[in-house]
Amino acid sequence: MKVSKEPIVTLGPMTSSWGLKMWRLILRRGEILAWPYGFKDGLRLGLMLELGIGRDPGDFSSKTMDEIRSALEEPSVRKFPVAGIDHITLRCSSLRHKIEIVAKDGSTEKFGLWHRHLLTEYGIVLRKMYPDRYRETGFPTKLWDRITKL
């Protein structure tokens, strides 16, 4: 998770489509952007995650503001204006933790967390950024549930 000098927070990598599509969520006060990894960047990310070497191609902290603006204007970027979001749910489950963005029209986008251990940190960030829209579900209350879900 990287925090820039502007009020922008990035979360990721995330997955969708049964893990075949990789995303980075960019949180801003007025909108949430889902930036997709391209094919080559997805392969680089996979190698980085498996081998533990290299740099995440979706990490915006090393890019200039012009590069970031250019990347976020690509047509493949999904945009969710906060005014159009009914709620954002952080779902804890034994299979895959998820962030679900539910629009006021009922449509839902789901993003699986690649790094399960960042669940608590993502919850803190989402709660601070969108306190009136943030929800949690499936979080364990008993010791055995904590062991198996987190």
Image (cartoon, rainbow, N blue to C red):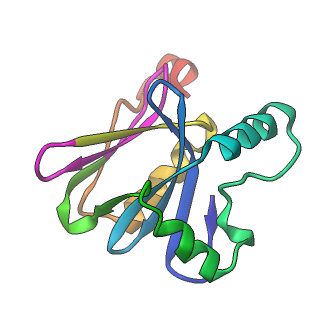
Give the residue furthest to the left: 105
Residue at point 85%, 39% (across, down): 52
Within the magenta stretch, is there residue 49? no
Residue at point 70%, 43% (across, down): 40
In front of the other: 147 or 85: 85
Tag count in the figure? Answer: 0
Counting from the top left corner in percent of width and height, residue 83 is at: 19, 68
The span shown in magenta is 89-107
Q: Quadrant of the N terminus?
A: bottom right
Residue at point 39%, 67% (across, down): 129
Residue at point 47%, 57% (across, down): 124
Residue 36 shown left or right of residue 5 in the figure: left
Res 66 quadrant in image: bottom right
Residue 66, compared with residue 130, is above or below; it is: below
Counting from the top left corner in percent of width and height, residue 63 is at: 70, 73
Residue 9 shown left or right of residue 65 in the figure: left
Counting from the top left corner in percent of width and height, residue 150 is at: 56, 28
